[in-house]
């Protein structure tokens, strides 16, 4: 979620950033700002009434001790309490409206990110190695995999439907070896701590990393148990420290995990229907760092170099 102070103090800048991200409902930012203002006013009014009630309650005690009549002042206390409940109800409504809007907003772009509408507008920062050239038409990964009997898509479809697959023989061993290789490099050379995490998480975890409700149509949910299959290990790894305060002297914390990841690919109909590019379940090794805000850019560069190192090896 975006910081509320940033929203109110940088409204026009935020609108420009969201436009660059292709966000269509720019007017919702003004609505969000109004909600924040109303919420503050309700909160101030509620605080004043609570103080008034506390003073009156103390007065009731004094009158009781002196044997006086508390009928009138008790009625006044009751009336104030009813007003507080009414305002708290309005506060809850505004809080829910604020949360629903804020959870649907995209993250703020780094100023160095170039504008673009699709992957075709991406700018190559640098290249490593040479792109090979062939005297023949190279086969696709799924053609090679099927020819070697490493990948069997038909059996995957038989078991789970479209966009499913099975690995066999050296294909299965290669998958396992790659996971072990990546984890060994990150833990032994890059100082990450390996963590085993669940593949199902609660709604609070999905919300904390921005998956819910923004991408609710993209992940699988088990309604009966109120659990969600993770679309990436980033979700459980990041939530390891949710609602906790990490002592500064323990930072940075670097963690890694290998998990299965599950995605519905709801908006990918007709795209990459062959092969392993868009599938409902895949394996991934994730890297996550917890650090001070002022160190985040440098730690991000380190993490990027660690991921690149896997490909260079």
Image (cartoon, rainbow, N blue to C red):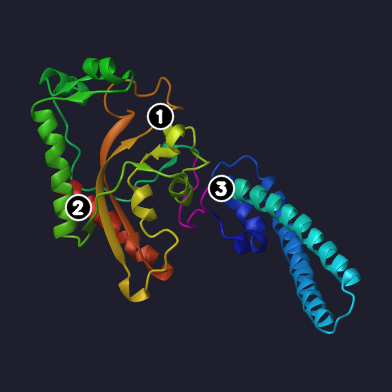
The answer to which quarter of the image holds residue 151 is top left
Q: Nearer the viewer, mark 3 or mark 2?
A: 3
Q: Tell me the tag on residue 264.
A: 1
Judge by depth and name the residue closer to the eye, 174 or 128.
174
Judge by depth and name the residue closer to the eye, 90 or 56.
56
Q: In this view, does 294 lie to the left or right of 140?
A: right
| Residue 140 visible in the picture | no
The answer to which quarter of the image holds residue 200 is top left
Q: Which residue is rendered at x = 89% and y = 69% of the image? A: 71
Contact, CB < 8 Å: mark 3 with mark 2? no
Spatial CA distance of label 2 from label 1 is 30 Å
Spatial CA distance of label 3 from label 2 is 34 Å
Spatial CA distance of label 3 from label 1 is 20 Å
Q: Where is residue 270 in the image (x, y as percent from the top left)?
A: 41, 19
Up/down of 121 relative to 302, above or below: above
Q: Which residue is rendered at x = 28% and y = 34% of the image? A: 282
Residue at the extreme front of the image, as rendered: 67
Q: Tell me the tag on residue 103.
A: 3
Q: Tell me the tag on residue 309.
A: 2
């Amino acid at each position: 979620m975006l910081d509320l102070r940033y929203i109110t103090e940088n409204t026009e800048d935020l609108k420009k950033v969201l436009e660059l991200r292709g966000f269509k409902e720019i007017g919702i930012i003004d609505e969000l700002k109004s909600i924040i203002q109303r919420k503050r006013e309700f909160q101030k009014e509620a605080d004043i009434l609570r103080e008034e009630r506390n003073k009156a309650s103390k007065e009731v005690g004094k009158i009781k001790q002196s044997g006086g009549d508390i009928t009138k002042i008790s009625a006044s206390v009751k009336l104030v309490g009813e007003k507080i409940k009414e305002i708290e109800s309005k506060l809850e409504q505004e809080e829910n409206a604020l949360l629903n809007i804020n959870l649907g907003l995209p993250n703020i772009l780094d100023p160095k990110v170039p504008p673009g509408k699709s992957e075709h507008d991406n700018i190559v920062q640098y290249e490593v190695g040479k792109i090979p050239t062939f005297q023949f038409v190279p086969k696709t990964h799924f053609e090679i995999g099927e020819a070697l009997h490493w990948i069997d898509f038909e059996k995957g479809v038989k078991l789970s439907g479209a966009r499913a697959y099975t690995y066999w023989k050296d294909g299965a061993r290669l998958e396992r070896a790659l996971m072990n290789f990546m984890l060994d490099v990150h833990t032994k050379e890059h100082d990450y701590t390996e963590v085993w995490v669940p593949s199902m998480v609660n709604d609070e975890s999905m919300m904390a990393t921005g998956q819910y409700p923004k991408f609710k149509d993209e992940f699988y949910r088990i309604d009966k148990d109120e659990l969600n299959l993770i679309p990436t290990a980033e979700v459980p790894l990041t939530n390891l420290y949710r609602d906790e305060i990490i002592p500064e002297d323990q930072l940075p914390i670097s963690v890694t995990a290998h998990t299965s990841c599950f995605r519905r690919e709801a908006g990918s109909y007709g795209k990459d229907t062959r092969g392993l590019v868009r599938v409902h379940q895949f394996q991934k090794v994730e890297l996550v760092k917890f650090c001070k805000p002022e160190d985040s850019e440098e730690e991000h560069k380190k993490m990027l170099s660690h991921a690149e190192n896997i490909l260079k090896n």
